[in-house]
Image (cartoon, grey):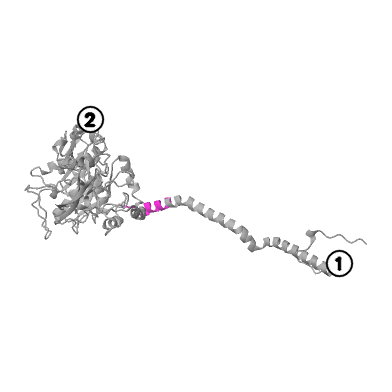
């Protein structure tokens, strides 16, 4: 009898059996136990392999091999949609902040009343205060007096009342077109005015002498001089002014200029109360410009030049005032392209020499020479004339360098710009600017702002000893290719009397380029040779 053929391997069940059915005959296993055991062992191994394959359908194995791929795809999908959504979330955030929490857009009621008054009556000078408007200009082809700046000034004169205004403009070394523009502008001015253009002899101004013997005119000395020439007519006999408004070559809203003059920090009587009040100037819609002249209430320089401008260092007073939305942000100095002063500090009936207030009790000395712009007399120290005048003002008022109340404020409701396009953007750009504050604080930390000035803590009148490097060969030290040996020298101690405004100054030298060999441009910066490494 023929034995039946074996079933194919793939027909065996996966679970091992005790015996095999073979068409009614006895299993071969019973005849040869050893052979049967060998076959059973082989079948068990084969069954285990099939079971291993079958376990791929088990949930745990599936999860082990498949889920990580799905999880990875899910994470990538989440990251993609997160990154894709960020711009839209930022847009929503800006819209919400700009619409419901706008910065320096909702003005105090008395600001709106002044604007309404200007609209209804054409005047925005509720108490008919006398205002001296001053500007020192350097225009090309009459672009200021024949352009938007000129129109804005004329509108401001009308708002203040021509009978209440004296307009003083000083321009040095104008070109022919500028002279014609000034003549045309003079014909349009309805108030008393002093409009002067002249060829200023720079050689007649005080120069400093460099260690190599070269004489140069400090840029700040020049700026202080032309600003003072614009102020000169304020001392005309018999006229007392209430306010001084100093203008740069900025574009501005004439009503906002009136608000700066008459609405900043009003007192219980409804009148503005300040020694000085500044606008905020922009070189671009987001970018604040005048860091050189601005110092916070602690006397420190500002942070990065975007809102809220000031850092959290020290008491953080100025920054806190900005974030609180105040119209009178306490500072030590500012300019902002347009600044209003209490005029009494710029006029004098006695003409006596300068005297500070009594430093013992802080009582002001009212018989003092009127305030004027000045520069730092030291060769290698510079401070903005616009910062120094505020330092002098505080010293005149209190006899101290940094009195408890500076009475100098920056008004962020009043914004100006150096071109018309930037000015047109400011009302929109300012709305969401509160969102910038955390970013501003973080970036200030990483870039190391504020950097304290070396004379930051000096008190006026204090006797100070400085260590000054004297060069053995000054001419070689100032050469463009000077070596370390050329800068050889030694330190000497020098005493000086501290002046107001130490927080304004820093080691620097800016000079006017009077000759072609001085270099291109109207002014330049002279690098101070560093002493050789010890």
User: What count of labels does the image hold?
Assistant: 2
Q: Residue furthest top?
A: 176
The crowding category of the residue bearing disc 2, from other C-alpha atoms within 10 Å (few below 14, some 14 to 19, many at least 20), is some
Tell me the element at label 2: helix
If you read the primary sequence from the N terminus, does the residue marked by circle 1 or circle 2 appear first? Answer: 1
Looking at the picture, tell me which residue is in the foreground, 131 or 128.
131
Is residue 126 at least partly visible in the picture? Answer: no
- Is residue 427 part of the magenta span, yes or no? no
In which quarter of the view is residue 401 placed? Answer: bottom left
- Figure quadrant of the N terminus: bottom right
Q: Residue furthest front?
A: 485
Looking at the picture, tell me which residue is in the foreground, 33 or 63.
33
Is residue 459 at least partly visible in the picture? Answer: yes
Bounds of the magenta span?
A: 91-103
- Measured from the top left, where is residue 313 in percent x and y? 29, 57
Q: Residue at 23% of width from left, 32% of height from top?
A: 516
- Measured from the top left, where is residue 262 in percent x and y? 20, 50
In which quarter of the view is residue 480 placed? Answer: top left
| Residue 140, above or below 404 | above
Name the dominant secondary structure of the magenta segment.
helix
- Measured from the top left, where is residue 123 in percent x and y? 21, 45
Looking at the picture, tell me which residue is in the foreground, 217 or 530.
530
| Camera-side mark, 1 or 2 | 1
Q: Which mark is residue 177?
A: 2
Which residue is denoted by mark 1 in the rendering?
28
Q: Which mark is residue 131?
A: none
* Disc 1 from disc 2: Cα separation: 125 Å
Tell me the element at label 1: helix
| Residue 281, above or below 465 | above
| Residue 196, above or below 318 | above
């Amino acid at each position: 009898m023929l034995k039946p053929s074996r079933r194919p391997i793939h027909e065996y069940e996966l679970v091992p059996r005790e015996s095999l059915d073979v068409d009614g005959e006895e299993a071969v296993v019973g005849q040869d136990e050893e052979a049967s055991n060998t076959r059973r062992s082989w079948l068990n191994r084969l069954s285990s392999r099939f079971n291993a394959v079958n376990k791929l359908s088990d949930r745990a194995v599936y999860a082990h091999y498949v889920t990580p791929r799905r999880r990875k795809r899910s994470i990538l999908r989440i990251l993609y949609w997160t990154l894709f959504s960020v711009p839209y979330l930022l847009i929503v955030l800006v819209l919400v902040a700009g619409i419901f929490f706008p910065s320096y857009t909702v003005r105090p009621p008395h600001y709106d009343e002044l604007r309404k008054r200007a609209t209804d009556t054409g005047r925005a000078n509720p108490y008919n205060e006398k205002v001296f408007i001053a500007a020192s200009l350097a225009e090309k082809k009459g672009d200021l007096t024949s352009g938007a700046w000129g129109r804005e000034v004329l509108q401001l004169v009308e708002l203040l009342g021509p009978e209440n205004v004296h307009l003083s403009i000083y321009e040095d070394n104008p070109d022919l077109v500028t002279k014609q523009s000034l003549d045309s502008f003079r014909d349009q001015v309805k108030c008393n005015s002093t409009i002067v253009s002249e060829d200023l002899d720079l050689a007649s101004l005080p120069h400093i002498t460099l260690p190599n013997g070269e004489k140069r005119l400090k840029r700040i000395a020049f700026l202080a001089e032309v600003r003072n020439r614009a102020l000169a007519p304020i001392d005309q006999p018999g006229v007392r002014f209430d306010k001084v408004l100093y203008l740069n070559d900025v574009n501005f809203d004439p009503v906002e200029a009136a608000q700066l003059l008459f609405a900043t920090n009003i007192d219980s009587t409804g009148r503005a109360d300040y020694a000085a009040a500044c606008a905020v100037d922009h070189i671009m819609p987001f970018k604040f410009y005048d860091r050189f002249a601005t110092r916070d209430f602690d006397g420190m320089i500002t942070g990065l030049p975007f809102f809220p401008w000031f850092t959290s260092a020290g008491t953080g007073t100025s920054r806190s005032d900005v974030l609180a939305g105040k119209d009178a942000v306490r500072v030590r100095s500012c300019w902002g392209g347009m600044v209003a002063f209490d005029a009494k500090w710029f006029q004098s009936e006695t003409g006596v020499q300068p005297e500070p207030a009594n430093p013992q009790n802080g009582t002001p000395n009212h018989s003092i020479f009127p305030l004027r712009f000045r520069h730092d007399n030291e060769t290698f120290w510079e401070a903005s004339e616009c910062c120094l005048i505020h330092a002098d003002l505080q010293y005149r008022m209190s006899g101290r360098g940094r009195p408890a109340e500076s009475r100098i404020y920056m008004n962020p409701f009043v914004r100006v710009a150096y071109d018309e396009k930037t000015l047109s953007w400011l009302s929109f750009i300012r709305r969401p600017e509160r969102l910038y504050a955390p970013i501003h604080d973080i970036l200030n930390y990483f870039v190391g702002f504020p950097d304290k000035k070396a004379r930051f803590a000096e008190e006026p009148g204090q006797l100070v000893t400085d260590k000054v490097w004297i060069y053995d060969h000054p001419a070689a030290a100032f050469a463009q290719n000077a070596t370390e040996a050329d800068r050889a020298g030694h330190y000497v101690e020098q005493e000086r009397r501290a002046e107001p405004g130490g927080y304004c100054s820093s080691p620097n030298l800016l000079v006017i380029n009077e000759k072609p060999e001085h270099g291109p441009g109207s002014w330049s910066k002279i690098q101070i040779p560093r002493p050789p490494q010890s």
